[in-house]
Image (cartoon, coloured by chain):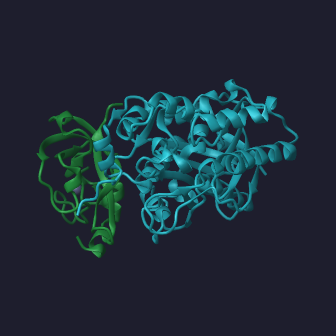
Chain colours: A green, B cyan
Amino acid sequence: MSVPRFWRNLGSRYNLEGTHCKECGEYYYPPRDTCVNCRRLGKIEAYKFKGTGEVVTFTVIHTAAEGFEEQTPYALAIIKLDEGPCLTSQIVGDPEKVHIGLRVRSVFRKLGSDGERGMIYYGTKFIPDEA
Amino acid sequence: MTIGIVSYGAYVPRYRIKVEEIARLWGDDAEILKKGLMVLEKSVPALDEDAATIAVEAARSALARGAFDPSRIGAVYTGSESHPYAVKPTSTIVAQAVGATPDLTAADFEFACKAGTAAVQACMGLVSSGMVDLGLAIGADVSQGAPSDALEYTAAAGGVALVIGRNESELCAVIEDTYSFTTDTPDFWRREGQPYPEHGGRFTGEPGYFKHVTNAAKGLMKKLDTKPEDYDYAVFHQPNGKFPRNAAKMLGFSKEQIAPGLVVTKIGNTYSGSCMMGLAATLDQAKPGDRIFMTAFGSGAGSDSFSITVTDRIEEIRDKAPKVSELIRDPIYLDYGQYAKHKGKIRFA
Ligand SMILES: [Zn+2]
């Protein structure tokens, strides 16, 4: 990942910042400037997602990409946020505890880094919501 | 003008390693260590946690508890001895992640274990002068002890965030005053680029910890004309369980006064988070009107003392974020091999 590309998306990576159409009620993550339903009639506003949702499906990663190898095995899941949109994220912790329908909440973690000298990438992951 | 704590938030990673497990590897006597250190286990960060992620989680918890607009934060100062970057502030990451950017000032603090309370004092100054509305002061660390070094038994991970403000109606605790005692003392250090700290062995106790803690504590009580009996609770920096107990005894504070804030037994020394974690655990159960005496210590060396009185507001905000006792229950225990991987003691090529 390039440093400028990561930096441009900080808001959505750190804080789950997306958008919401006031016209039809649709939520977008990642953010969209135009509403798919309403097109030019849509009224898009910035929206910060609450960070709660549930696991729709998941897979357990045993052989990870460079920068993630020390974290294996871990669960990579598609999460449906309570407002509607789905996103892909690592589920922190024991992958054996992950199941479809698991309630999760967002946390701030290290996503990876460019080796020992490069940038450290921070952002959102999810953990089981036991509260 | 009244200055105080608008909100507070704590974070402790889920993982623990027991003193027995570290002692097993090095052939040390766990029973003697547990008795000597008065620590049973310590917190260990997850592989994807560092001082920045811990600072963010603690700060978000403080924001959830305080329920104020984050754009009111005019200063973010993060104290740590394990900032993830040598050059590139942790505090900008925190400021962005709590939604306080861009209308603020930010910087990182370093002063061994008291960098967090130094940040609190800086925020008190900015808030009382009117330069900022709210200040966010954080102490967070993922501290390292060299394998088989005595520090390995206690060097832990955790963080606490305090939001400092001056609107009397929104303070959950008033900070009446603060006093510091600072000298150049080589009791503990880490050179640039070195992974583990060095320490002066037994030297860390008398001329380091005890001299500074007792002088700062006495200095503040003299300044305020208070005595130990005037306080309901006391919190001292907790590099182990023994030092704060001894410091309390030397100053005339009772076991009961320090009991709620002694969190080191179950999580170890969270360095910049240590004393503030004790304060957070005490605020978790203090009643309106209760007075808390707090003294942090940082090697190198210095101590910051604070006199704090809890207000009615504490009851309204306390349950809006996890208490320290909730953060430390239900840990996941690691064996030494897993622990070494978590702490980066095994390097991946
Ligand atoms: Zn629409």
Q: Check the image and name the residue furthest to the front.
A: B27
Residue at image position (74%, 62%) is B129
- Position of residue B210 measured from the top left corner of the image (x, y, whole percent): 71, 44
Residue drawn at x 60%, y 59% as measured from the top left: B111
- Left or right, A62 with respect to B273, comes to left
Q: Image quadrant of residue B240?
A: top right
State how many labels appear. 0
Expressed as whole percent of the image width and height from the top left, the position of residue B9 reads: 52, 43
**B218 relative position to B77: left or right:** right
In the image, taking residue B16 as reference, residue A66 lies left or right, namely left
Between residue B212 and residue B310, name the one nearer to us: B212
Q: Quadrant of the C terminus of chain B?
A: bottom left
Furthest-top residue in view?
B256
> Camera-side residue: B303 or B229?
B303
Can residue B5 be seen here? The reply is: yes
Given residues B224 and A34, the one toward you in this image is B224
Find residue B217 and report its horizontal and vertical position in percent: 77, 44
Does B325 sit above or below residue B349?
above
Question: In the figure, residue B312 lies in which quadrant?
Answer: top right
Horizontal side of B114 relative to A99 (left or right) equals right
Name which residue lies at 42% across and 46% down: B148
Quadrant in which ligand 1 is drawn = bottom left
Q: Nearer the viewer, residue A18 or B123?
A: B123
State the residue at coordinates (83%, 42%): B221
